[in-house]
Amino acid sequence: MIHGYLCTDRGDQTAVRRKFLMDHLRYIETIADKIFIAGPEPSDIPGVYKGSLILYKVDTAEQAKALFDADPYAKADIWESVRPISFNPAVGDHVGGVTWKIIDGQVQMLKKPA
């Protein structure tokens, strides 16, 4: 299962994001093998972000929380809201297409999603 967070910035956090960017990226590099996908949510203004999404490849929500809490952006308290997400990939390039097959009107799983 994939666990992570959908985060909305506390207003314009451009200055704080810039201040902690290198620390944040260095941290992300150390845990990159545990990240399914992550990135900022752009606003309508180039170079300004309004939130972030980070999904971890971990077994439990508690493991995701520990990784998230150690992030310099989380420590800088840039987000107004942080919503935990559990996600089960079922279709798309990342999982090699679809993860099921319909046989005689029944759904059969072909492989376990990532």
Image (tube, rainbow, N blue to C red):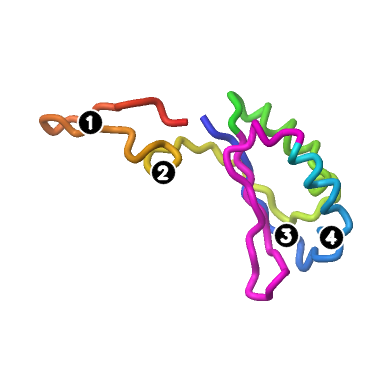
- Residues under numbered marks 1 and 4 in contact, where contact means CB atoms less than 8 Å apart: no
**In 3D space, how far apart are the residues under numbered discs 4 and 3 (Cα atoms)?**
14 Å
Give the magenta-colored segment's residue range.
30-56
| Residue 43, image quadrant | bottom right
Residue furthest to the right: 19
Q: Could you tell me the amino acid type at mark 4?
A: Arg
**Going from the N terminus, do you reach mark 3 or mark 1 first?**
3
Task: Check disc 1 and report the residue beneath it.
Answer: 107
Say which amino acid is labelled 3: Asp
Q: Regarding mark 3 in the picture, which secondary structure is present there?
A: strand
Cα separation between marks 2 and 3: 29 Å
Give x and y (percent) for residue 59: 58, 24
Q: Where is residue 111 drawn, in percent x and y? A: 35, 26
Q: Are marks 3 and 1 in contact (CB under 8 Å)?
A: no
* Vertical side of 83 occupied by 1: above or below: above
Distance between the Cα atoms at labels 1 and 4?
48 Å
Mark 2, residue position: 93
